[in-house]
Amino acid sequence: MLNPLRSEDDAFRLLLYAIGVVVVIAVLVVIVRAIA
Amino acid sequence: MEAASIPHPAGHAGGEHHGPPPAHHSSRVEAPLLGMLLFIISEVMIFGAFFTAYFFIRIAEGEPWPAPGMHLPVPVAFVNTLILVSSSFTLHWAEQSIKRGNRFGLKAGMLTTFLLGCTFLFIQINEYANLGFAPQDHAQQTIFYSLTGLHGAHVFIGLLILASVTVRAFRGHYSPESHRGVEVPGIYWHFVDIMWIVVFTTVYVL
């Protein structure tokens, strides 16, 4: 299980996940705004 | 010399032990990691309070974001985001290098991370100097400076820690067996990066 406070490895993986999630959310919002 | 005749507890036979007794550990988590865990939890609460104010100002008041006359330099902030994210990659490289006994990778990674962090902070200060609005102008401007400034303060503290780790790395500290001094600041730096990604997305993009 991912625990970003356990090791630098896990913290780095969380950073990558955060980038992925934020990019997806930002793209979705931009698309919705363009359509609306 | 009365004290010398007092029998010592088991494990300290012959009075060989000096200094305070060993600390009792009631947790299975190492003390440095536990400290960083509690610290980051408190940090999440601080950022949470600032984000609450941000969303209140932006949504409850129903005014457009950014307010008229409040121009945000999104391209510059985006490049700055890439710089900060890159610093996490170089820090990860440094940590992986010392785990494998690669001292050059540790030193190069730490130095690059530190310089990238300095570049980020320099660009942000330069951005503040050229924004054209002040914190006292409006609530939106206030929360903009508060959120980005709070994060900038964390970057500054992180840079102090990274400078210490970098100097120690160049002095020959750390080894594949003992690199907690790189790992714990690394966790903090990644946390600072994640917070910036959230700040950048909410303040500049959305």
Image (cartoon, coloured by chain):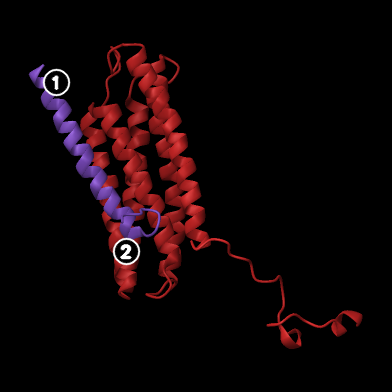
Chain colours: A purple, B red
Q: Identify the element where label 2 is drawn.
A: helix
Could you tell me which chain the residue with mark 2 belongs to? Answer: B
Q: Residue furthest right?
A: B2
Q: Amino acid at mark 1?
A: Arg
State the image quarter where residue B109 is shown.
bottom left
Q: In the figure, B48 relative to B142: above or below?
A: below
Q: In the figure, B88 relative to B19: above or below?
A: above
Residue indicated by mark 2 = B94
Indicate the quadrant containing the C terminus of chain B: top left, top right, bottom left or bottom right: top left
Of residues B33 and B160, which is closer to you in this image? Answer: B33
Image point (37%, 60%), residue name:
A7
Q: Amino acid at mark 2?
A: Ala
Image point (35%, 40%), residue name:
B195
| In this picture, residue B11 sits left or right of residue B59 | right
Could you tell me which chain the residue with mark 1 belongs to? Answer: A
State the image quarter where residue B11 is shown.
bottom right
Q: In the figure, B12 relative to B64: above or below?
A: below
> x%, y% of residue A3?
35, 54
Of residues B148 and B50, which is closer to you in this image? Answer: B50
> x%, y% of residue B1?
91, 83
Q: Residue furthest left?
A: A35
Circle 1 packing at 10 Å, graded few (<14), some (14-19), many (20+), is few
Image point (14%, 26%), residue name:
A30
Q: Identify the element where label 1 is drawn.
A: helix
Residue indicated by mark 1 = A33
Q: Residue furthest bottom?
A: B14
For marks 1 and 2, give the CA distance: 41 Å
